[in-house]
Amino acid sequence: MNIKPIVYENLTPHQRVVAAFEAMARGDKEEEDRLRETCPFNDYQMRDTAFSSTMESLAACAVEIESFLKGQALSKASLELMGSDGVGDEFLLQSMVDLQTAWVAVLAEMGISDKTMRAAMPIRHYTVDCLLADAPPPNAEAVGKFVAEIKEQVPTW
């Protein structure tokens, strides 16, 4: 396409996003690159990204972990309602305690107590606490994997 540079320079962010997705949809890598390369540069003043991105990542991770734990608790309740006779319980409880242990370990490494995080972030359902109290001991290998996954999402120092 032979579009004058002035057109690219005057695109609004919304127009540029729409045009970029349209170029991607039709497989026009050249146009997609042109839209990216002609996007204007801006200077910004903002809060320290080490602080703000860590806060945002921790909040998102806390919500994700609490959602996972509630989902596992719901799965356990569903299995019980279907009369599973405990089939799958061990796996559900093990994954819950392993993730919770990993989360507490990452927080501790960052100097944040579990108590502080739980007071500041999403409210944990009582059922999750009850299930965690009855869970088997954490599996060190699984905890290590969860720690690595959490650290990929949360910038630690």
Image (cartoon, grey):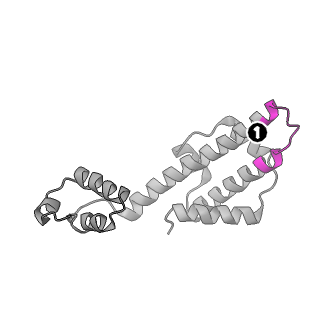
Find residue 117 and report its horizontal and vertical position in percent: 56, 50
Relative depth, front residue between 54 and 111: 54
Does residue 110 show up?
no
Q: How many marks?
A: 1
Find residue 101 and report its horizontal and vertical position in percent: 69, 56
Instruction: List the residue tagged with mark 1.
Output: 76
Q: Quadrant of residue 141?
A: bottom right
Residue 88 drawn above or below residue 28: above
Q: Is residue 104 left or right of residue 154?
A: right
Residue 140 drawn above or below residue 13: below
Instruction: Name the residue located 54 percent from the left edge and 46 percent from the top edge.
Output: 63
Instruction: Name the residue located 52 percent from the left edge and 61 percent from the top edge.
Output: 153
Helix, strand or loop for disc 1: helix
Q: Which residues are magenta?
A: 79-92
Is residue 81 one of those drawn in magenta?
yes
Q: Quadrant of residue 1?
A: bottom left
**Residue type (three-letter) at the residue carrying disc 1:** Lys
Instruction: Name the residue located 17 percent from the left edge and 65 percent from the top edge.
Output: 2
Relative depth, front residue between 7 and 92: 7
Q: Furthest residue to the right?
A: 85
